[in-house]
Amino acid sequence: MAEPGQLNGIDLQDLEEGLKEIGEQEEARHARKRSRIQWLGGFRFNSFVRNNTFIVEEPASSTAQEQAPNSMEYVLGALGACLATGFVLNATRRGISVHNLEVALDSSQDNVFAFFGLSDEGHPGFQQVRAKLYVQADSDEDTLKEVWEQAVRTSPVGNSLARVVSITPELSVV
């Protein structure tokens, strides 16, 4: 049973106050994100984001022991988490109680061989991503569909994948 003033594990007053505060900060409109990646040897890396760290690993062969997801799997997981967050956020703001939620993602890459230097055709990025929401909530299907469509439309990760993003590479030899 939810505590008074809470819905979906979220304090409603804190949520609205936090959103109001964010909306009053013009610099928050263009939020900056930073990450630092440290090589651990082989195809294994430590990624630092804020006060968090996680391992990224690309198996050296099809028989290699995998100990962590590769970069594309993290992108796929980030998309799913972003979509789920958007759904819970928008459902909560509409007063919809969510009982259970899962986002299943399935993707294909255009030509992963391009990354490995085995082909010059196409690109190594995602060609297609399918995201399916499974949800139990106290609302009708049409409303839940609207909330899902809003989550997809406003997903920062989804928009980053679907739009051209400028990447400025630099090199510093130390």
Image (tube, helix red, strand yellow):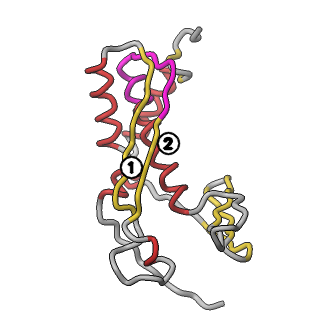
Residue bearing mark 1: 156
Q: Position of residue 143 (x, y in %)?
A: 28, 21
Which label sits on residue 138?
none
Q: Report crowding for label 2: few under 14, some 14 to 19, many 20 or more residues within 10 A (C-alpha).
A: some
Q: Amino acid at mark 1?
A: Pro
Reply above or below: 50 against 89. below
Q: Quadrant of the N terminus?
A: top right
Q: Nearer the viewer, residue 13 or 161?
A: 161
Q: Position of residue 173 (x, y in %)?
A: 61, 91
Q: Report crowding for label 1: few under 14, some 14 to 19, many 20 or more residues within 10 A (C-alpha).
A: some
Q: Position of residue 142 (x, y in %)?
A: 26, 21
Q: Secondary structure at mark 1?
A: helix
Q: Is residue 137 magenta?
A: no
The residue at the point 48 percent across, 52 percent down is: 76
Q: Nearer the viewer, residue 118 or 154?
A: 118
| Horizontal side, residue 145 vs residue 10: left or right | left
The residue at the point 53 percent across, 23 percent down is: 10
Q: Is residue 100 magenta?
A: yes
The residue at the point 45 percent across, 80 percent down is: 169
For marks 1 and 2, give the one nearer the viewer: 2
What's drawn in magenta, residue-wise?
A: 88-102
- Reading the chain from its start, which is encountered first: label 1 or label 2? 2
Which label sits on residue 81?
2
User: Residue lying furthest bottom in this view?
Assistant: 173
Q: Quadrant of residue 136?
A: top left
Cα separation between marks 1 and 2: 11 Å
| Horizontal side, residue 1 vs residue 64: left or right | left
Reply above or below: 128 against 123. above
